[in-house]
Image (cartoon, rainbow, N blue to C red):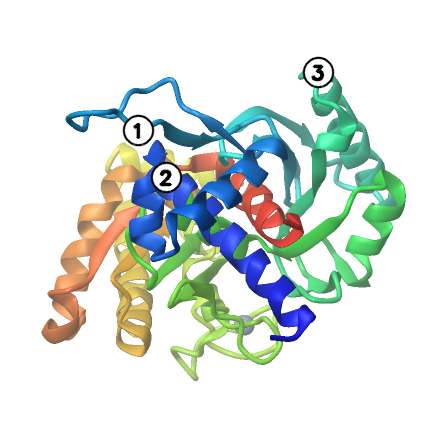
Amino acid sequence: MEKQDQLLMKKQNRLLVLELIRAMSPISRIQLSKVTKMSPTSITRIVQELQEEGFVRESLIESTSIGRKPTLLELCPDVLYTVGVELDRRIVRVGLVDFLGELVDFKLFQRKSQESYKETLNNIQEKTVQIINENHIEMKKVIGLGVGLPGSIDYEKGIVKISEQLQWENIPLADDLKELTTHNIIIDNELKMKIIAENTIGQSIDSDNCILLGIGSGIGAAILLHGEVHRGTSNNAGEIGHTVIDPNGVICHCGKVGCLSTYISESAIIADANKVKPINSIEEVYDAYRSKETWACNIMDRVTTYIALAVSNMACLYEPEYIILSGHLIDELPGIGKFIEEKCDRYIWQSIRQNLKIVYSKLGSEGVVRGAAIQAQKVLLDL
Ligand SMILES: [Zn+2]
């Protein structure tokens, strides 16, 4: 075997053992040997290396097996950290995440309406340093930052191609942030980061085929197929907000007519509400809906219909095991789920509906931050 191949295989075996300890912790060397089909000698050697490097430790939990009890192994949570960042139009969230994917600390700050790109970057840098120092983490243990933001993102080059919400176009965000923070940076669309969190610590841990729908200021989706984020040709797969559902509808900010987004985005809901009475914010519509005002119920009835149609279309295209509903609308109006599901029962083809689980994200405002940090760990950890 070529030396290059040997090195690659060694790396893959180490990663496999590490991921198994993560998934099945606490686990014995014997179990690892059985699951990986590697010899006990190889497992002992790999585990010893990982222990010496600080990734793995012996657990204090005792094995329940009969006879001589094997020592169980677990990951060391504090061997390394990543920082997750969620960038939105008005809010920036920063979270410190440990090797187990647990959130150690979380901060958020407002983005001023006229805040420049440079100011936002400086604020991220400041909050990152602050969160690391306040938790007394050695800087060298932080292996990088993951940033999730709305828009079309060149994931490989680290470029924001266009973000309508942030008003950024063709910006080398990863390079600029690396220069400022000196950390390695990965960036991606926020929902593509969030689905990593759902698949690691959230609602779809037991499935490799799931879709996350985000419903708020806009509507979008992230698709996980066979455990990998489905990106399409240029990382725009999942932009269902711009699927045309009525060629005679109203014009969308993308320039086309009748996009799904023009029916269920917050600005569309507010525009509809203003036909009845002066309304300034989505919260006013939600309050009126909670008070069962007829006009608000009618608007939300239409919104749930379009959400159910979006769920139906995604389900028919990909037949996922889970469709996870998330976003401001779902967080604010949890009771609306049952209306969406009733309509899904009506619209989705029975052969697909019977195997589809519609669930709701429980990660709230931490979802993108944790997903971005976990993804940063996956990409940047060099074993
Ligand atoms: Zn559009």
Viewer-side residue, 44 vs 104: 44
Residue found at x 37% / y 39%:
29
> Which residue has dot 1 on it?
70
Secondary structure at numbered mark 2: helix
Residue 342 visible to the viewer: yes
Secondary structure at numbered mark 1: loop
Disc 2 + disc 3, Cβ < 8 Å: no
Whether residue 183 is situated above or below residue 254 in the rendered picture: above
Secondary structure at numbered mark 3: loop
Name the kind of residue labelled 1 in the image: Pro
> Which residue has dot 2 on it?
29
Q: In which quarter of the image is the N terminus?
A: bottom right
Ligand 1: image quarter: bottom right
Residue found at x 70% / y 21%:
137
Disc 1 + disc 2, Cβ < 8 Å: yes
Residue found at x 57% / y 50%:
378
Q: Where is residue 25 in the image (x, y as percent from the top left)?
A: 36, 35
Give the mark nearest the N terminus, 1 or 2.
2
Does residue 369 appear to the left or right of 61 in the view shown?
right
Name the kind of residue labelled 3 in the image: His
> Which residue has dot 3 on it?
136
Residue found at x 47% / y 73%:
259
Cα–Cα span, label 2 and label 3:
33 Å
Cα–Cα span, label 1 and label 2:
8 Å
Label count reads: 3
Q: Which quarter of the figure has residue 305?
A: bottom left
Assess disc 2: are there few (<14), some (14-19) or many (≥20) residues with their C-alpha within 10 Å of its C-alpha.
some
Give the mark nearest the N terminus, 2 or 3.
2
Q: Position of residue 64 (x, y in %)?
A: 19, 25
Viewer-side residue, 355 vs 6: 6
Cα–Cα span, label 3 and label 1:
35 Å
Viewer-side residue, 329 vs 103: 103
